[in-house]
Image (spheres, rainbow, N blue to C red):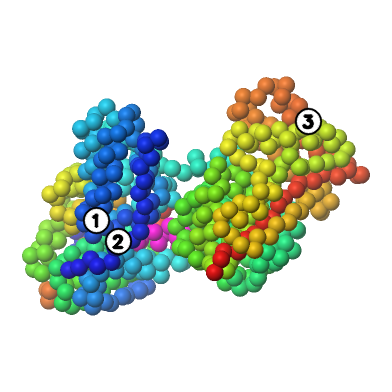
Amino acid sequence: MKSQKAAISVAFDQLLSLRMDMANFTADWLHCDQLSNYVARMVSHDRPDPLRHSNLLSSVLNELLEMSFRSETDDGELVCAFCRCREIERVELTFPCPPRQRQFYKDVVLGLKTRQVLASYLGAIANDSAPGDEAILLGLVVNYDAEVQLRDFGAGTLTFIVDLPLGKLLN
Amino acid sequence: MTAQSPSPVFTVRFDISDQEFSLAGVLRPHSPAEIADDLLLLRNGIEAVNGVLYVNLKRVTHMNSTAFRALTRVLVDASHSRPELKFVVVASSVVAWAARMFRHLTDLSPNIAIEIYDSAFYPGQAFVENQSFIPILRTQTRMTWRHEREILPRHGLRTGMAIADICCGIGDFAMLVRKEFDPARIVALDHSMASLDYARDVAEKFGVRDIEYTYGDASQMLLESDQFDFVICRHSLQIFDRPEMLLRELYRICKPGGRVYITNEKNSHCLGEPRSDSIQWTYHEVAKLFSHFDMDVEMGPKGLRLLQDAGFEAVKMESFMVSNLDGDPQEFADIIAAWRDVYAGEMSVRRGDSQEFIERFKQGFEDHIFAALHPRGYAGWPIWAASGRKPL
């Protein structure tokens, strides 16, 4: 896992930032689908193949939004920011998250660097009892070549920083 | 936490005669319980088949981790409980996440195979995707454009519209439409990466940045519904084995009140003088040859019926004849020579035609070229243009 400092120092341009009251967001499961499609469409218009880029990005965003939807906290805000640095696209998703859940995510993200990710992913998708969020994070690394980082400033919120080489995946 | 709205729309189907379980649309359930009935259909289907079960996912545009894991467990469990059964999962090459996600099914069970569905759906495309065919496609477009730039306004094309060119090939028609009709938006979709690469290169060289070229399956496009004022699909329905499926998609992406414009040929009506008998025989054989590969190059006059059957109203149709009198006769002759090389070449050989047949088949093209270049000759290639309005 990259250090927090390294993650922040990379020169990404922010294209979009979207804020939503968490209680409103979690009022309807369909919001995950709608938000992911909306954000993906907005930031894909200048890509070589906007439709396919949007479809691919929406898949990643939806997984992250579904994860935040299940965070079991209604207080606070969901913030979804989208940034780009050359061919790497970055999603920053901040949402309220209880301490135990934050620790769980930290352990999983640490494991993304230290475990056999593919084997872990295959175990997670074939096993009913594996936590869904773990399968999602492993899936981002295995299926989307994502680099996943966490930023935890305390204060009951957590930020996922997910870097994606989407252009490479589309070719 | 609640999950009030139903999940996004998807459809599920099991066809016992094809031993095929199909999913289409957006699968983003909140929990596996939401798709339990659909997975039960799959489980029951697995019990009912022998040999191979096809799991057709090529029209799935989104599938979340919840749905993927639930589907994976059903397939992996079944591959263990019925080891004699082979599972073939078919995914689309258009949806970039699909191949990367579904490939893991093979890692989990050797009885599960993954097939990536791409140009196989377009039986004719393989014959014209060769790079050497590109100059001919450009010439064809240039010759038809002389007619179509006047025909298109009669079918409702105006400046400032949102336009989609579906099966755009090398993108040259989209470039001409852009220049002539200054659209508010223009999307050009094709299922050939090579053709799109060519289109993007040309656009780049000409400094054109406002054509959205996209790789896609015209029978299940990622484009949203009710988006375009004018949807173009030229010379393509005739090379699909299921044109009605394509028309449904053209209808879907067209705005209510917008129009879908199609062109198709009737190859047996290609003609020329002198040597008309030889020419006519060969082009009748062209129609039979394409029919052998499940393509209908006699479709042109059927456009009226096809559009009406697809639900369009105010259907219009007209025909025009591209001929050696349209500009340089050598260009027309070059087109025929390219047809000769493909039709009496790869296609005829692949059908298993005799050398004797191929020689006679070729002669008709040679005679058509002769007619095109003869100072007093005439050579024609008839095309039917039709359009229909999507009801409000």
Residue at the extreme left of the image, as rendered:
A100
The residue that label 3 is drawn on is B363
Give the percent coordinates (x, y) of residue B66: 24, 54
Q: Count every numbered label the image shows and give the total.
A: 3
Q: Which residue was labeled with disc 2?
A: B7
Residue that lies at the very extreme toward the right in this rendered image: B376
The answer to whether marks 1 and 3 sit on the same chain is yes
Numbered disc 2: what chain? B
The local crowd at label 2, few if under 14, some if 14 to 19, many if 20 or more residues have their Cα within 10 Å, is some
Q: Label 3 to label 2, Cα distance in Å?
A: 60 Å
Q: Nearer the viewer, residue B21 or A42?
A: B21
Span shown in magenta: A47-58
The answer to whether mark 1 and mark 3 are in CB contact below 8 A is no
Q: Amino acid at mark 3?
A: Gln
Q: Position of residue A166 (x, y in %)?
A: 37, 57
Quadrant assignment, res B46 = top left
**A36 part of magenta stretch:** no
What residue sits right under mark 1 in the picture? B34
Residue B61 in picture, x, y percent from top left: 38, 54
